[in-house]
Amino acid sequence: MPSKLASDTVSQWLELLFAAFQSGHLHKCTLSKPGPEAAADLKNIYIRPVMLKKGLHLAFNYRYATRDEVHNFLPNAARTLLSELLDKQFLNATALRACSGI
């Protein structure tokens, strides 16, 4: 069971991630180091914003040893899923924020 400190850290990280997403500055996010509850051949998940007919979504690219699967989620569903993935299946998460003007 994760500690309260770990839960607070994940919550803070998700707040920052979704602030970047909502402002249009999120380029991609990577979940890596699968834990014991992750699928046996799941290596990592790449997440990026995509514009679909129904609006802005987050595309989750599940990278397995022999195949990829992409699933698109609305922001609220993506946030819930990310919270669950970081709580139980992945030990590491990084986000790359896009820069504007240098």
Image (cartoon, grey):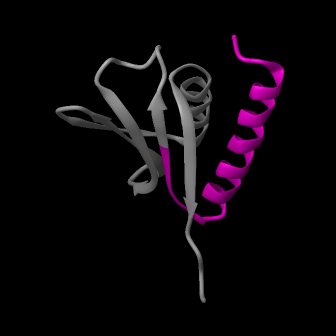
Instruction: Provide residue 66's location: percent of width, then percent of height.
Output: 17, 32
Q: Is residue 100 above or below residue 11?
A: below
Q: Which residues are magenta?
A: 1-30
**In what quadrant of the picture does the N terminus appear?**
top right
At 47% from the left and 33% from the top, the residue drawn is 33
Task: Please identify the residue farthest to the bottom as the structure is shown.
Answer: 102
Q: Is residue 40 above or below residue 86?
A: above
Residue 26: within the magenta?
A: yes
Task: Please identify the residue farthest to the top as the structure is shown.
Answer: 1
Is 9 positioned to the left or the right of 14 in the image?
right
Q: Indicate the quadrant where residue 5 lies.
A: top right
At 77% from the left and 35% from the top, the residue drawn is 9
Q: Indicate the quadrant where residue 6 lies.
A: top right
Instruction: Provide residue 100's location: percent of width, then percent of height.
Output: 59, 81
Residue 61: within the magenta?
A: no
At 52% from the left and 28% from the top, the residue drawn is 90
Task: Please identify the residue farthest to the left as the structure is shown.
Answer: 66
At 39% from the left and 53% from the top, the residue drawn is 52
Is 10 positioned to the left or the right of 97 in the image?
right
**In what quadrant of the picture does the C terminus appear?**
bottom right
Instruction: Provide residue 77's location: percent of width, then percent of height.
Output: 55, 32
Nearer the observer, 49 or 36: 36
Task: Considering the whole magenta stretch, tell me its main secondary structure.
Answer: helix
Q: Indicate the quadrant where residue 63 lies.
A: top left
Instruction: Provide residue 50's location: percent of width, then percent of height.
Output: 42, 55
